[in-house]
Image (cartoon, rainbow, N blue to C red):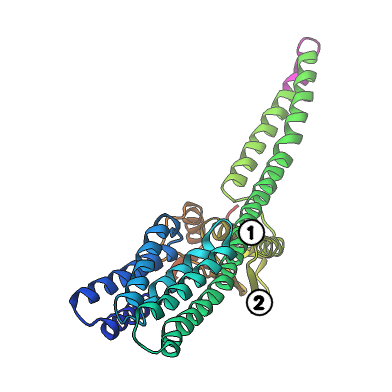
Amino acid sequence: MFFPLLAVVGAVTVAFDARNWWEAAVLAAGVVATLVAFVRWAADDLLPVAAVTLAVTAAVWAFGALAAEGRMAFFGISFVGALVAPKLPRWRGWAAVALVGYVAAVGAARTLVSQQEVPENLIRYVLIPTGVTVVVIGFMFPNKRFYDIVAELEEAREREAELAVIRERVRFAGDLHDIQGHTLHVVKLKTALARKLVDSDAERAKQELREIHDLVSDTITQTKELAYAQRRLNLSAELENARNLFEAAGIDVRVDREADVDQRVGELLGQVLRETTTNILRHAQATQVRIALSASSISIVNDGAKHAPVPELRGLAALAQRVAANGGELSVDQHDGEFRTAAVLPDGAEAAR
């Protein structure tokens, strides 16, 4: 946004101060150095070119003040110096003082080589350039702190989102433990019992082995359901969990309930909500999420979507097939930085078991 403005100011400076083509070339070099410094500053990569751009703009100011009538030649050194000083790892304050001192000293030296009145030189080449430099530096230091705070907040938000995903994984691990831990313990006991009975009571041993087989089969089924998000879910619990995860990640959440959700479709809607919550935390840079519920539908809209084609979301693709199998439709779309996931089921549809 500021690049065109800087370019225009630089062009006006050259046109206003240059009396011939070679003065215009020198002043233009200062403008180019200023624009390069600004572009690298915006990319957070200013320090590698700081010395070169400072040297060029400092030389242009000395040329403009001492060898030409370049009253506006301080434009480059004032702006580049104000960009560089706050970026330094240390001695920022001293660097700012040195910058102001250099601009004032070069302007004061003008009085030694100029035939103009001293008060006029002091105003044009000392007071105005020094004052502008002080104002620009005074603006850039708080600006640097503001961006540092924004960066710290963004980093903290990313960490919160990562922690939220980790908590979700821990919850999944807890569900998996609940399913398999008890089963494995019971299988161990029944296997030991069957070994003891195999010689003394073969029928009882066979019965134990049949129960072990049935128990393992049931556990395999439950594990598959958990892995593919098909375990029976409580929509209210999932809604509360999603709210907690988003709030922990610093995301504002708004829930609109148009009607009570039909119990027979609540499980499928809960699965859609769980998968969408995970996708938002992992893939989006969201600051707001809106969840709308009706008797047989859910809509989740988040901002922070990347300006790119809709990504392939395998979890939602699998759920879309289940929703379609129940006579409904799951859709995703992206527009103006917002990502919308919606599932609609016919009234009375039953979630697949």
Badge 2 element: strand
Q: Main secondary structure of the magenta part?
A: helix
Q: Nearer the viewer, residue 324 or 35?
A: 35
Q: Amino acid at mark 2?
A: Arg
Residue that badge 1 annotates = 156
Badge 1 element: helix
- Picture coordinates of residue 104 (x, y %)? 48, 75
Determine if residue 285 is in view: no
Is 173 contained in the magenta span?
no
Numbered range of the magenta stretch: 198-206
Q: Nearer the viewer, residue 217 or 179?
A: 179
Mark sitting on residue 129: none
- Picture coordinates of residue 321 (x, y %)? 47, 56
State the residue at coordinates (52%, 64%): 85
Residue that badge 2 annotates = 257
State the residue at coordinates (45%, 89%): 119
State the residue at coordinates (58%, 64%): 94
Instruction: Describe residue 67's horizontal placement relative to residue 173 as left or right.
Output: left
